[in-house]
């Protein structure tokens, strides 16, 4: 019963997306500019476990077969063949996109998603051409292949990211996107909408003259900025809505792509390729951005855990640049060495606080580690703190080597010497 419900849900959504796609078409183009139905199928497969794929594909196949019967006047057998194309092409696309079960938001996952979408669209177009040969012997095979390929690819690249971005989504009372990036993305999307309506207006050649054909790229940076500021979920929705706006305006004869057509519907073909390229750029850019953000979050979490551990055991950390001697103190160092430790910005300033009788040995030890002569050294010495107190510390120095094998940094851990601990 659960699988039946899943199949019925997918069938209803695919048919709803099909009617939406058909509503974007116009008599001036005589072709559907984008096929969103397959995007529903593709996205549903990407967010579902493998054992539910048969139900999803069956529901999608029935919906597409019904669409062929309703809109293309196919008989029962051709309609079933029409639905089988959806099953085969989307099953192949999802199999490629889920290789290794990579996260679609990661660079590898985004690349697989794009590869699967393009491959599935191309295979579906090949099968559709054979169907048209059978049912429409006089049809233009090349035009039919290009129409199916581009309209399906655009639908997959626009709808699937929305579905995958909202996988596991739950409404929360707090959290979510901060106000600053939300407002920034809203302003960028508003700018995109205004510029897009101007550039893709009717009779744009009369407004902009010979520059009309070059203005298609003008609104896209605003859309890209909005998508990046809004993150995976908001960005996917922004890309979908913005792309549909450009496709809708072009299908009605507006915008730079409709200035000059070599054949009826050429403008739609051009805007499909235009949107497909930008959708791929968006997917890969967002994946790289999300990968960097996730890496920074992981690094921040590990750093916080490391700093808390050092504070718990009463140890201060500092990193020195092996060449300049610049000092970077770890969080919590002021608890051990006093608030004035923040004024110590170099190893020489730290060494100036060491008792004169021991300073030379400490400087020699640091130089030996910084030059790579010694990998690690541990010693103790007395140092004057910022409040005038004297503290005997035990220091462990270690060199951090770069890619060329030379020491780039000198890491140090400091803690009160055992004698200081014993005396309280």
Image (tube, rainbow, N blue to C red):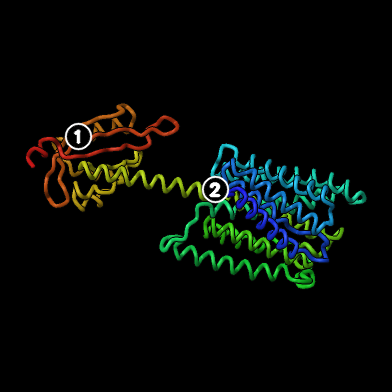
State if disc 2 and disc 1 touch (CB < 8 Å): no
Q: Secondary structure at mark 2?
A: loop
Q: What SS does tag 1 mark? A: helix
The image shows residue 103 at horizontal and vertical percentages of 54, 44
Q: Nearer the viewer, residue 118 or 354?
A: 118
| Residue at 70% over, 58% down | 15
Coordinates of residue 111 in the picture (x, y in percent) = 61, 43
Q: Residue at x 54, y 67 (%)?
A: 186
Residue nearest the observer in this picture, 37 or 2: 2
Check the picture and name the quadrant holding the C terminus: top left
Quarter occupied by residue 313: top left
Q: Quadrant of residue 108?
A: top right
Q: Outermost residue, right direction?
A: 138
What residue do we see at 71% from left, 68% from top? 199
Residue 210 shown left or right of residue 160 in the figure: right
Inspect this view and state whether residue 157 appears: no
| Left or right position of 263 against 173 | right
Can residue 357 be spotted in the picture? yes
Work out which residue is located at the far left of the displayed protein and give it: 423
Q: Earlier in the sequence, mark 1 or mark 2?
A: 2
Q: For mark 1, what is the residue?
A: 360
Residue placed most toward the observer, 244 or 299? 244
Left or right of 276 on screen, residue 169: left
Q: Quadrant of residue 403?
A: top left
Q: Position of residue 94 (x, y in %)?
A: 64, 43
Q: Position of residue 312 (x, y in %)?
A: 22, 44
Q: Residue at x 25, y 48 (%)?
A: 332
Q: Residues within 10 Å of mark 1 (few under 14, many from 20)?
A: few
Q: Which mark is residue 147?
A: none
- Towards the viewer: 117 or 297: 117
Which numbered disc covers residue 105? 2
């Amino acid at each position: 019963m659960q699988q039946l419900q899943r199949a019925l849900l997918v069938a209803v959504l695919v048919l709803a997306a099909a009617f939406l796609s058909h509503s974007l078409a116009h008599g001036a183009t005589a072709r559907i500019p984008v096929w969103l139905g397959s995007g529903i199928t593709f996205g549903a497969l990407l967010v579902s476990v493998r054992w539910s794929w048969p139900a999803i594909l069956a529901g999608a196949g029935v919906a597409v077969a019904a669409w062929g019967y309703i809109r293309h006047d196919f008989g029962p057998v051709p309609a079933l063949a029409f639905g089988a194309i959806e099953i085969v092409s989307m099953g192949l696309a999802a199999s490629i996109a889920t290789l290794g079960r990579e996260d679609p938001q990661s660079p590898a996952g985004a690349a697989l998603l794009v590869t699967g979408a393009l491959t599935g669209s191309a295979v579906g177009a090949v099968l559709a051409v054979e169907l048209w040969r059978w049912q429409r012997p006089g049809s233009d095979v090349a035009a039919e292949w290009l129409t199916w390929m581009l309209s399906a690819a655009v639908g997959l690249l626009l709808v699937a990211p929305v579905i995958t971005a909202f996988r596991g989504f739950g409404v929360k009372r707090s959290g979510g996107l901060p106000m600053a990036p939300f407002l920034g993305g809203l302003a960028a999307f508003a700018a995109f909408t205004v510029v897009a309506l101007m550039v893709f207006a009717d009779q744009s050649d009369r407004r902009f003259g010979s520059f009309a054909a070059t203005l298609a790229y003008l609104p896209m940076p605003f859309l890209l900025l909005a998508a990046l500021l809004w993150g995976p979920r908001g960005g996917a929705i922004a890309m979908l809505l913005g792309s549909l706006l450009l496709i809708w305006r072009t299908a009605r004869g507006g915008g730079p792509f409709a200035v000059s057509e070599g054949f009826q519907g050429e403008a739609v073909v051009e805007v499909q390729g235009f949107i497909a390229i930008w959708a791929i750029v968006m997917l890969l850019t967002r994946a790289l951005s999300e990968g960097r953000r996730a890496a920074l979050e992981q690094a921040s979490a590990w750093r916080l855990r490391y700093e808390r551990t050092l504070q718990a055991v009463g140890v201060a950390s500092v990193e020195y640049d092996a060449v300049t001697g610049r000092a970077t103190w770890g969080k919590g160092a002021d608890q051990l060495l006093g608030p004035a430790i923040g004024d110590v910005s170099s190893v020489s300033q730290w060494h100036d606080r060491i008792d004169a009788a021991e300073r030379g040995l400490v400087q020699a030890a640091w130089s030996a580690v910084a030059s790579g002569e010694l990998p690690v050294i541990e010693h103790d010495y007395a140092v004057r703190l910022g409040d005038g107190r004297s503290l005997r510390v035990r220091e462990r120095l270690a060199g951090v080597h770069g890619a060329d094998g030379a020491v780039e940094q000198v890491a140090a851990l400091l803690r009160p010497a055992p004698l200081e601990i014993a005396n309280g």
